[in-house]
Image (cartoon, helix red, strand yellow):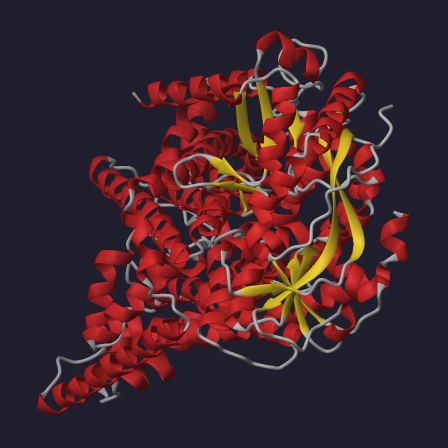
Amino acid sequence: MNVVLENLGPILEAFWSTVLLSVASAIGALVLGTLLAGMRVSPVPVLRASGTLYVNTMRNTPLTLVLLFCGLGLGNTLGLKFSETVTVNSYWLAVVGLSAYTASFVCESLRAGINTVPMGQAEAARSVGLTFGQTMTTIILPQAFRSVVGPLGSVLIALIKNTTIASLIGVAEAAASMRTLIEFNGNAVIPIFIGFALGFMVLTLPTGFLFGWLSKRLAVAR
Amino acid sequence: MNDKPTTSGTAKRPRRQAQASVLYDAPGPQARLRYNVYTFLTILGLLLVAWFVFVRMDEREQWEAEKWQPFFTSQLWTTYVLPGLGGTLGAAAVAAVLALAFGMVFGIARLSDHVWVRIPAAVVVEFFRAIPLLIMIFFLMRGSWSLFGTSISTFWAVVLGLMFYNGSVLAEIVRAGIQSIPRGQSEAALSIGLRKGAVTRLILLPQAITAMLPAIIAQLVVLLKDTALGYVIGYSDLLNQWRNLSSAYINLIPAAIVIALIYIALNVALGYLATWLERRNQRSVRSQTKAVTGPAEVGVSAAGPTAGGGAAGPRA
Amino acid sequence: MRVGRIATVASAVAAMTMALSSCGLIGGNGGGGEAESVVQKAEEQGTLTIGIKFDQPGLGLREPDGSYTGFDVDVARFIAQELGVPEDGIEFVETTSQNRETFIEQGQVDLVLASYSITEERQERVSFGGPYYVAQQDILVRDGDDEIQSVEDLEGRTLCSASGSRSAFNVTETLAIDAQLREAGSYSECLELLSGGGVDAVTTDDTILAGYAAQQPGEFQLVGDKFSEERYGVGMPKGDTATCEAVNAAIAAMYEEGEAETLLDSNFGPANYEYTTELPEAEPCA
């Protein structure tokens, strides 16, 4: 365990980077995912079709490739620059990739949630003259969100674990840190692995319990 | 209450239509005009993005014929892509079989009447679900030397990593599937004198498998996608061959686009298989058991440690 | 019927388990086949399995027609010939930086020539013949970029290196140069970033850089400020002294006959790369 303790500073720093990556991507994915869910149930066929195409493409591409596209395609070929500092730039490119990928799963969860809202509610909303946008934002989505807190928790946990792949495009998060440590301490692979596994469990397990509790708390009584 | 579908993947497609049409009125003249405006704006926006991407790629000389022409030669496919595809499918197939076995064993073990079976099984399943697959595979590759005093090949590092993770998720699906069977069934079976093992084997599992099938296939799509993680340890899969072929042809970006399309085609095909199986099941099985919801099928890693959160099927 | 299906699954599982054990999930040690040492196998069977890189132009590259080119490949062919293995007796296998030791330990390859630097840590798991070449760490920039003349000029610039490699560490930590580091999955990605303007320079062994420069003439140039040596060895199963000695003799012959210079020139010629043609001092085989 000595290797882990000696390098505790950099390791915690790397995990902090994992947390930042997860939080920013979660926000991005939630916003984009809600938008996509709205598109997929909207009255405009083109919006529905593009939403469906987006979700199916993202869901069926390995995240590794999505992130490589962000690092090389967006960041280099398309010349998207968030910052002059390379590390900051890589961080935001990874956030874009993780958000874009995770959004498709948020969208699908939400769409399932929309299905749990009784039809009568939407019919009632229409009959009092609400438009599609009003029906969605004031009636359907609030209930849909409450019914999919559990699945959204799973998506968030998956996202936290998926941030490890950002190491491929040069983000110095926990997996990159583990890799470097192993590269320089080849004889202490096991303690290093245990240390990082514990670190991830500290992040994922409480998140799971929190969302389990929340989903019970917020469940719509029917 | 309406007999609303649970959040199961099963009923999405047909019911979405019904649901969606409930969300808005049939458009009148004004609404139709508005929809047309939205349609126009959406198409305009998409075209703008496409134009921007096209121009930027053109500036970077990504459309040069010599970067794309190789894809029309048979050599590129026989030298790089097909062997890579073989690596990906091979690892996925072996990992799928092992993960199913792992899932069955641990899913049933978690429902055991014996605490000394139930608790260790739970610990194993929760552990593998809580840590990222990437660091697991990396550890299997680099740590096997310290752990076993010998090393395991890249193939087995990928396969075992996939087995541990997807097997744990499948264990939760199996558990939820068995729990979704009405309790009366096992009570009836016990009362006519079947042993516990026989109840599981003859009564619960056959029905549970039917209910679990969509979720299992969804998880297998995840597994297939996750083989791409073999890239980090140099397992010679499709993504690894992308590196090789783009080194030979100097066409990193075009090659990445083509490889991504192959992955998408593979996964979409598997997805259709899932839908087809679901339909077939719905037609042929007149079981009361409802489909078990898979834990949100999120790439590399899905599902939370809360047992109820992801994989709980509807109780009868 | 359903029970039948379960039985099928069960038997499939059983078959898999058997396959698992017979495939050698946990591999034995030793270099392939029944032979005790690699050199013995080469002599008796006339075949060798050699691990090379498949994605390094100039060193080890799998060509579209399925052939292999590069300095490592040529050296491998020369050594194999000296060990009595004809060219069609060589099977080339891909090894990457992450899995070279594993491939040797598993017996999946007999020898590894894959820009494989001799380090003490690796010597705990495998043995090395050679070195057959001593590479230097260097810097590659876009052609016509005269602002970076030495490693010190990297101060404040962006620098690409493969993730987990020591090359970047040498610049930012050992030499304490304040360069911004962009890590990438492979050097091909680094080169894409370099040509697209995503980074200002790429650093690693000069052989690797020269390989890219030779592959795309007129696109990149080597800075030529050499720091930190990398001694390329021939990886082989640990303790295979006989093979180590035979390999060292082959390498000495390669330099004596002038073959080394020919191979270096044919692979790196267009890169304007000043290679050395002196026989590197061999490591003791023990």
Residue at position x 47%, y 26% from top?
B200
Q: Quadrant of residue B29?
A: bottom left
Whether B47 is drawn above or below C217: the answer is below
**Number of on-image labels:** 0
Q: Residue furthest front?
A: C257
Residue at position x 85%, y 52% from top?
A4
Whether C88 is drawn above or below A221: the answer is above
Q: Position of residue C4 (x, y in %)?
A: 34, 18
Q: Quadrant of residue B212?
A: top left
Whether B85 is drawn above or below C187: the answer is above
Q: Position of residue C216 (x, y in %)?
A: 49, 58
Q: Residue furthest left?
A: B29
Q: Quadrant of residue B147?
A: top right
- Horizontally, residue A3 falls left or right of residue B202, namely right
| Depth order, front residue of B11/A57 | A57
| Depth order, front residue of B164/B146 | B146
| Depth order, front residue of C69/B28 | C69
Q: Please indicate, yes or no, whether residue B312 appears anywhere in the rendered image.
A: no
Q: Please indicate, yes or no, whether residue A197 appears anywhere in the rendered image.
A: yes
- Horizontally, residue B175 falls left or right of residue A126, namely right
Q: Position of residue A57 (x, y in %)?
A: 35, 60
Q: Position of residue B68 (x, y in %)?
A: 32, 56
